[in-house]
Image: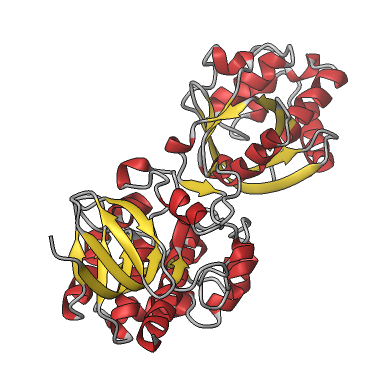
Amino acid sequence: MNKLSYQVAIIGGGPSGLMAAIAAAENGAKTLLIDKGNKLGKKLAISGGGRCNVTNRLPQDEVIKHIPGNGRFLYSAFSVFDNYDIIDFFEGLGVQLKEEDHGRMFPVSNSAKSVVNALLNRLEELHVTVKTDTPVEAVHYGEKQHTLILRNGQKVTANSVVIAVGGKAVPHTGSTGDGYAWAKKAGHTITKIFPTEVPLLSKEPFIKEKKLQGLSLRDIRLTVLNEKGKPIITHQMDMLFTHFGVSGPAVLRCSQFVVKEFLKGHKQVTMEIDALPGMTSDSFVNEYKRKMEENPKKTFKNICKGLVPERFLDFLLLRNSISLEDKAANISREKFINFTRDLKHFQFQVEGSQPIEKAFVTGGGVSTKEIIPNTLQSKLMNGLYFCGEILDIHGYTGGYNITSAMVTGRVAGMNAAWEALAT
C-alpha cells in the first residue's frame, strides 16, 4: 500500500478539526482531514438542539469569563482570531447568523446543516483530502515528519499534525478520548478528566420519592456551597428536578464546581436554591406579613399563590408543617420564618454526577502549560498541535465551547501550515 504524504494532517472532524483543515489549506498547505466516523461535523450538527449555536457575540472578556476552565489561556489565540471573526467567517461563507438571548449566535436557517454544509463546501473548494471511516491506530513522531498508522494498514506522513479528536463527552459523536494516548506519547501531561455541564445525582428523600420529578423552576438563583457553607459559584437560570436528582441550565452551569468538590474527596456537596431572587428575605417578610394581616381568613397557600410553581409551593408548605387549608391567622411566626427561609435558602445535598458520557463537555485534558498559547503548538514536539476539547479548556454551554474549539482550530491549522511550509 502506498505511503501518503501531506504537509498538514488533521485528526478529528469536529468543529476544531474542520476549522484547522480550512485554515491550513487557506494558508497553502496540502492538507488531509481524517476522521474515524462516517460523517464530519457530528457534534456541530447536534449543537444548540440541532440549530447550532456557532458562537457568542458577548465582548471578549465576557466570553473568556464564561470559559471558567482555563479560559484565560485563550487570550493569545483570541488576538489572532476571535468570536467576531467566527461571525464574519460564516457570513463570508454565505451563512447568515442571528443573535438570540445572552449573545448566542445561530444560523438564520435555524438548521445546523447549513453550518456543517458551508464548512464541507469550503473544504472541497480548498481541495482538502477528506478520509472518513478511517480510524488512526497510532501516531509515530519523527524529527522532521510524523507518521499516522491507519487501521487499514496505510501510512500517512505529514510535516505537521493537528490533534483535534475532542474529549470524552458525547461519545456517539466520536469523542472517545483517543487523543490522550497520542498526547502522552509526545510527553504531554493529561490533567484529570471529569464531566462538566452534566446533570447531578441526589439521594434526598424528596428526590427518591419523586415528589418534585419533572418540575421546572424558572429564573431561580442556584448556589454551590463549600464545606464551610460559603458560596463557590451562583447562577441565575432555570432548573429541573428529575427522578435521579437535578438538571437544567442552572444545574449544568454549576456542575463543574460540584464535580471539582467531589474530586477533592468530598462525598456530598450542598446546593442552595433562592426561588425569589428579585426579593430580599426582609422585603418578603414585610410584604407577606401585611397580606396575612389584611386577609386573616384566607388560606396561607392562597396568599402565596403564584410566588413559585404550585407543586413547589405545596412541597415547601408541607415541609414546614403548614397545612394547605391553614388560614393566615393561624400561621405561627416560627413557621412563617422557616417557610421564608426555604423560599430563599432551600438547601439539598448532591452525591455525584452522571458519567462523562452523559456530560455535554469534558473537563481536563492536555495541559495548557505545555502548549504555546498564540500558535497552539506543543512545547515538547515540533510539528504537533492541539485544538478543541482535547485541551484542558472547558466552558459553559451557550456557544462558548464551540467558540473555543473554532478559535483554537483556526490558530492551530494556520500555524501548522506555516511550520510545514517552512520545512
Q: Check the image and report above or below for 379 versus 210.
A: below
Residue in the picture at 46% in, 72% down: 407
Please state, as top left, top right, bottom left or bottom right, where the C terminus lies in the image. Answer: bottom left
Residue 392 in sight from this viewpoint: yes
Count of picture labels:
0
Please state, as top left, top right, bottom left or bottom right, where the N terminus lies in the image. Answer: bottom left
Q: Position of residue 391 (x, y in %)?
A: 52, 58
Q: Is residue 265 left or right of residue 159?
A: right
Q: Position of residue 328 (x, y in %)?
A: 75, 20
Viewer-proximal residue, 323 or 112? 112
Q: Is residue 81 left or right of residue 93?
A: right
Q: Check the image and report above or below for 219 versus 187.
A: above
Viewer-proximal residue, 416 or 93? 416
Q: Is residue 293 left or right of residue 247?
A: right
Q: Check the image and report above or below for 366 versus 219.
A: below
Residue 299 in sight from this viewpoint: no
Residue in the picture at 47% in, 70% down: 408
Color theme of the render: secondary structure
Q: Looking at the rendering, which quadrant does residue 60 occupy?
A: bottom right
Q: Position of residue 348 (x, y in %)?
A: 69, 26
Viewer-proximal residue, 10 or 214? 10
Residue in the picture at 50% in, 31% down: 354
Q: Position of residue 88 (x, y in %)?
A: 37, 81
